[in-house]
């Protein structure tokens, strides 16, 4: 999001969706997922990461575990070791291992879509 217009559009998409997925667990992805769950606790929020632990930055393992635990405790669904193959027409996400993650709005924070 690089402008007020983008932020307004983002907010509208979040408000009209019951299931939201954030793909990517850098600082931005973690913050976006946490903020959505904080302001819209009734919504399903999925946080999807390619590897087994996040954030991937060089941080203490205890801190990484704390972040992961805090997000789970907040009610965010965390998908680890999950690679998205395709965003389906209905918003659901197909993974490379054949699973479907139900979603209506997807925020790509991985740097790649």
Image (cartoon, helix red, strand yellow):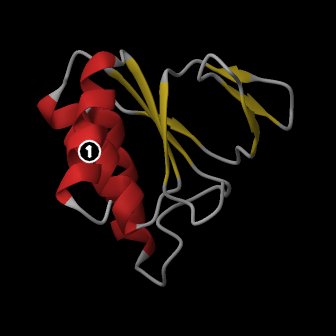
Residue 55 as seen in the image, left or right of residue 30: right
Q: Residue furthest right?
A: 97
Q: Which residue is mark 1?
A: 34
Residue 30 as seen in the image, left or right of residue 74: right
Where residue 65 appears, as percent x and y from the top left, is: 40, 58
Q: Is residue 17 visible?
A: yes
Q: Residue furthest bottom?
A: 58
Report crowding for label 1: few under 14, some 14 to 19, many 20 or more residues within 10 A (C-alpha): many
Which residue sits at x=30%, y=50%?
32
**Count of marks overlaid on the render:** 1
- Among the 4 quarters of the image, the one containing residue 16: top left
Q: Secondary structure at mark 1?
A: helix
Q: Nearer the viewer, residue 39 or 7?
A: 7
Which residue sits at x=17%, y=56%?
4
Q: Nearer the viewer, residue 99 or 63?
A: 99
Where residue 62 appears, as percent x and y from the top left, is: 37, 68
- 29 relative to 74, above or below: below
- Among the 4 quarters of the image, the one containing residue 28: bottom left
- 89 relative to 62, above or below: above
Which residue sits at x=23%, y=36%?
11
- 70 relative to 78, above or below: below
Quarter of the image containing the C terminus? bottom right
Residue 12 as seen in the image, left or right of residue 25: left
Quarter of the image containing the N terminus? bottom left
Residue 72 as seen in the image, left or right of residue 91: left
Q: Is residue 75 visible?
A: no
């Amino acid at each position: 999001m690089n402008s007020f217009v983008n932020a307004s559009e983002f907010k509208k998409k979040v408000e009209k969706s019951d299931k939201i997925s954030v793909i990517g667990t850098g600082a931005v992805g973690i913050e976006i997922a946490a903020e959505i769950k904080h302001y819209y606790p009734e919504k399903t929020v999925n946080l999807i990461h390619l590897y087994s632990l996040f954030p991937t930055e060089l941080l203490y393992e205890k801190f990484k575990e704390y972040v992961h635990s805090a997000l789970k405790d907040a009610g965010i669904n965390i998908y680890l070791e999950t690679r998205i193959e395709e965003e389906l027409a209905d918003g659901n996400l197909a993974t490379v291992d054949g699973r479907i993650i139900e979603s209506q709005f997807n925020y790509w924070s991985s740097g790649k879509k």
